[in-house]
Every structure is written in C-alpha cells, then in structure tokens.
Image (cartoon, rainbow, N blue to C red):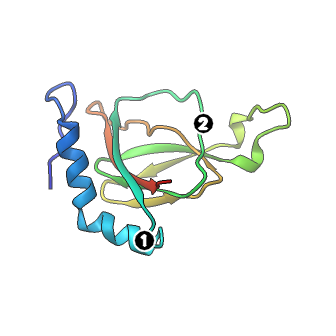
Amino acid sequence: MPEYRDPGKEAVRMEQLQRWLEEMAAAKALQAAVYGGMPIETGYCNGRNTTYNGFEYHKGSEINIAVTDFMLVLGHSYDILESQSYDIGSARVFFVEKGMAIEMYQTTLHLSPLRVTDEGFCCFGLCGSR
C-alpha cells in the first residue's frame, strides 16, 4: 500500500496512485457489495483545509476511507431552502478516524474534509461512474 506523504514535501504521481486504487482489492469488493458491480471511479483528496465555504452532493453514494484523521461538515439536501441557500446551523461536524470507511448518501451535503493536524488530511474516495 502506498504511504501517504504530505504534498508539500513530496510530489504525488497521480497516474500511479490512480492505477493502485483501481486495482485495490478493497475497491473491487466495494464495487461488488455497494455498487452492485457497476463501474466506479476511485480517487483521493488531500490538503490542509481549515475553513468551510460550500457544499456539494452527488447522484449516488460516495465512500470515503480515511488515510489520516479529519473532520467532515455534513448537511442534508432536504434542508436547502427555497431560495437555494442553506442555513449552516443545520450542518453537523463529524470526526473521522484514520482507517474508518464512511458512506455519504446522495442526499448528504459535503465538501472536502478539514484537517485536524498541521500535517493536513488524506482520504480515498469511490463513487459510481456513468
């Protein structure tokens, strides 16, 4: 398994990491168990975020596997107001421990994780592909 390195200290070879993710046995098992064998996309997200200024959601579930500890700010798409705005007071912050896998349903508002240490965060992600 490749070791996570801080992007400020070592360049990440995206092609190599992507190939590893696609070949990873866990990704294939999740593809079969969670996505019913349909095509999936794999990737990773890393950084040093300390603020949160937006949300996104997808048309299907997204699985994230924590390579480091991080926090997620999550909301529900049903809480989007008629004005297409969102009351941030409806969102909740969750701590995600290294090694934990989480599923965010298609109604889950989310964005990139937030760091809990100065070293930043990293997670692998999987979602259905069209």
95 lies left or right of 10: right
Give the percent coordinates (x, y) of residue 35: 47, 68
* Label 1 sits on residue: 37
Q: Is residue 94 left or right of residue 65?
A: right
Image-quadrant location for residue 9: top left
Q: Which quadrant would residue 5 be assigned to in this image? A: top left
Between 107 and 19, which is closer to the camera in this rendering?
19
Identify the element where label 1 is drawn.
loop
**Residue that appears at 57% across and 27% down:** 53
Q: Position of residue 43 (x, y in %)?
A: 34, 46
Using a 10 Å C-alpha cutoff, classify the residue at mark 2 as few (fewer than 14 neighbours), some (14 to 19) or many (20 or more). Answer: some
* Residue at image location 46% in from the left, 55% down from the top: 127
Q: Residue at x 49, y 27 (%)?
A: 51
Q: Are marks 1 and 2 in contact (CB under 8 Å)?
A: no
Where in the figure is residue 116, as x and y percent of width and height? 37, 38
Q: Quadrant of residue 22?
A: bottom left
Query: Does 39 appear above or below 58?
Result: below
Residue 81 numbered tag: none
Which amino acid type is shown beneath numbered disc 1? Gly
Q: Nearer the viewer, mark 1 or mark 2?
A: 1
Q: Which residue is mark 2?
A: 55
Residue at horizontal 42%, vertical 61%?
A: 39
Q: In the image shown, does 75 or 40 lie closer to the viewer?
A: 40
SS at mark 2?
A: loop
Within 10 Å of the Cα at label 1, are there few (<14), some (14-19), or many (20+) other Cα atoms? few
Q: Work out whether 24 lies above or below 125.
A: below
Disc 1 from disc 2: Cα separation: 28 Å
